[in-house]
Image: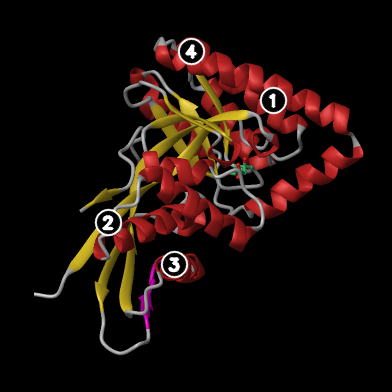
Amino acid sequence: MAKSITVSAPGKLMLLGEHSVVYGFPCIVTAMDTRMRVTVEFCDGDTDLIITPQVKESKFVTQSLKLFKNKFKIKQAVKIQTQGDFSHQVGLGSSSAVTVATFKALSELFNKSLSNKEIFDLSYSVTIAIQGVGSGFDIAAATFGKTVYYVYGGKVIDLIKTEELPLVVGYSGLKADTPTLVRKVKADYEINKNRVTGIFKEITLLVNKAKIAILDKNYQQLGLLMNKNHCLLQNLRVSTPKLDAMVKASIKAGVYGAKLSGAGGGDCMIALVPLEKRTEVENAITKVGGSIINVNNNAQGVRLE
Ligand code: MEV
């Protein structure tokens, strides 16, 4: 039988530290067990066949394949098929997951035994080539999985020992464009460097305290830090009335804490929730027009299926 390799990689959720991470400050990200699957096999002829029904950006697969073939001087044509548990619409990291899974699958097919750090570096260079901006936190989540304390470009990738966090994820119904929001913050930064750097430093204090709160399973404290992080993101002008309403409704329903997650401008918010309040919080978020995404966090990184 022809050799066929299937690999999957998880999506991500930013816990704390979005935007400031782009400027060299740390963030905390957790991997989601919504996964992108990539199947690769050899094919006849010299034209690669790329089938990506669920991924808008087939360019991530194409670019990864090109880079891999150049690196290892490979001419053999391949067929690559992707399949996903989640839509690229909700901003949970389908592009980074598919990129990481493509490199892992190709390295298995061609017996190149790339380490996770090598997969991270290759995938990050693909993201930068395509998007132009990005800290790479999503690539770290897709590669290493679990919950990670992360610094720009993979300078620090520290796994935080934790069990799954009691999170509720609410989707605002609006797809956000991360590069646009990163550029918007950059424009503000260039106008008032001191003010924006001040916000980044405050966020960093929260991120460092959150790392300890996660290790201590101190969800009360973690929740307060998330609330404060949301306020700072409001000051950065990346939240939206809808995200604010979802955060406010969930706080009223009795969460430990809540915040937008990711670039802002739409996509998702997260709430850290006591078990007994889960249904109440989900209803509160739905009532203000959000929809609940049922996903587990602290998931495994890239793996062979
Ligand atoms: C986007 O989900 C998070 C940002 O910090 C961008 C990045 O880190 O690449 C806004």
Report the residue at 60% width, 43% height from top.
135
**Vertical comparison of 172 with 14: above or below:** below
What residue is disc 1 on? 231
**Vertical comparison of 217 with 14: above or below:** above
The kind of residue tagged 1 is Cys
What residue is disc 2 on? 7
The kind of residue tagged 2 is Val
Label 4–label 1 contact, CB within 8 A: no
- Please tell me which residue lies in front, 293 or 276: 293
- Please tell me which residue lies in front, 233 or 196: 196
From which residue to which does the magenta span run?
48-54
Residue 40, position in %: x, y? Answer: 28, 68
Residue 212: mark in rendering = 4
Q: Is residue 144 left or right of residue 89?
A: left
Q: Quadrant of residue 289?
A: top right
Check the image and name the residue furthest to the bottom: 45
First reached walking from the N terminus: tag 2 or tag 1: 2
Colour theme = secondary structure
How far apart in space, not on screen, are marks 3 and 2 (Cα)?
A: 13 Å
How far apart in space, not on screen, are marks 2 and 4 (Cα)?
A: 33 Å
The kind of residue tagged 3 is Val
- Please tell me which residue lies in front, 258 or 78: 78
